[in-house]
Amino acid sequence: GNNTDVNSTSIGIELDNNGKDSFTEAQLHVLEDLPAVLKKKYNIPTANFIGHLDIAPGRKVDPGILFPWKRFADSGYGLWYGDTTNTVLPVDFNVLMALRIVGYDVSKPQAAIQAFRQHFLQHSNTGELSEEEKKVLYVLMMRFM
């Protein structure tokens, strides 16, 4: 949103991982218990479970492409997209506007695109978004509309 001081209004959870190795089941199991407590105690909306890379594109890279975002979204911690098979993009679809609506700081467009790719597509391709990647972004954006 328009919050410019996220550190004062957030809870950070640190996991020990070098970004190159998969997270262990033990780490993920322990992590699954904590968000449930926090979500209930502080009434945290599902969409507000995000990573460092989402809030500071280009500056932060954790938890990285190996973090199982879909697994946590399926448990109610963060958003995920659905089937994009029949998704038709509007002719005037604006990638940066969609990223902004989803919550990314787009002042550094390529960093925002990279953060989106790492979180939702779990790869680190570069360049413009493909048609399929745009469909994922569009589906996510529509959850905010």
Image (tube, helix red, strand yellow):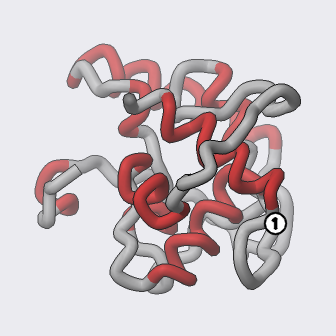
User: Left or right: 122 with respect to 40?
Assistant: right
Q: Pick whichever, 68 or 25, lies toward us.
A: 68
Residue 103, x across and y down, in percent: 37, 52
Residue 107: quadrant of the picture: bottom left
Q: Pick whichever, 53 or 81, lies toward us.
A: 81
Residue type at tag 1: His
Quadrant placement of the C terminus: top left
Residue 71, x across and y down, in percent: 73, 31
Residue at horizontal 80%, vertical 64%? 130
User: Left or right: 125 with respect to 139?
Assistant: right
Residue 96, x across and y down, in percent: 46, 66
Residue 30 in sight here: no
Q: How many labels does the image show?
A: 1
Q: How would you rate the neighbour count of disc 1 (Cα within 10 Å): few for under 14, some for 14-19, many for 20 or more?
A: some
Residue at horizontal 62%, vertical 51%? 91
Q: Pick whichever, 80 or 129, lies toward us.
A: 129
Residue at horizontal 35%, vertical 22%? 39
| Residue 105, above or below 12 | below
Residue 124: quadrant of the picture: bottom right
Residue 28, x across and y down, in percent: 70, 39
According to the picture, the residue beneath numbered tag 1 turns out to be: 123
| Residue 109, above or below 120 | below
User: Left or right: 50 with respect to 24?
Assistant: left
